[in-house]
Amino acid sequence: MNGLISEEKKLEYGKRIANECKYHTWSDGETVKINKHALEQYGLDLGSFVTIRSVRDDEDSEKAMLGIYVGTVPMFDGRINNPVFYVIELKQIRAGCDTWWKPIRKEDYSLNCEEMRERHDFTWEEIKLKVSELMKHLNLSGK
């Protein structure tokens, strides 16, 4: 498992965070409720971890960040479900249409540090540290 928290704990933490994220506010100020369901076509369950980058031309577009899939929000009068992610480093919810993202899948657990960094821009130890910091911030580590 390369020093990462167990799959069960990762899902438990991710689901806790997903359950806490209830609304997304678009850049125009409109706030919409986040729908809680898996996106099977992308292999995303609530609480799944992703590598995420901003598509905006700002400082966040230069670096990969760790995100957690928290559900979908409707777009185009409800015709499309857009995935939304809690970005740990920013402590913000970002919509999939505003980001480049890819899931961190179970098969990635067998990657060594160099392969993991090449695929996701993180090592397992860096992910473990980010998740630990988040759990402390959310006061979830002892629950």
Image: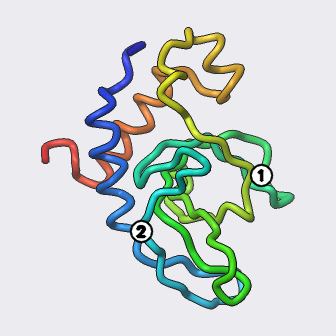
How is the model colour-coded? rainbow
Residue, x 54% and y 22% (percent of image)?
108
Q: Residue at x 54, y 69 (%)?
A: 72
Which residue extends farthest front?
A: 41
Q: Nearer the viewer, residue 78 or 109?
A: 78
Q: Which residue is mark 1?
A: 59
The N terminus is located in which quarter?
Answer: top left
- What percent of the width, then of the height, locates residue 42? 60, 48
**Looking at the image, how many numbered discs can be counted on the residues?**
2
x and y percentages locating residue 27 in the rendered image: 70, 81
Distance between mark 2 and mark 1 Cα atoms = 30 Å
The residue closer to the viewer here, 141 or 84, is 84
Disc 1: CA contacts within 10 A as few (<14), some (14-19) or many (>=20) = few
Q: Quadrant of residue 6?
A: top left
The label shown at residue 36 is 2
Task: Identify which residue is drawn at 52% across, 22% down.
Answer: 107
Mark 2 and mark 1 lie on one chain; the one further toward the N terminus is: 2
Q: Residues within 10 Å of mark 2 (few under 14, many from 20)?
A: some
Residue 24 higher or lower than 124, as above or below = below
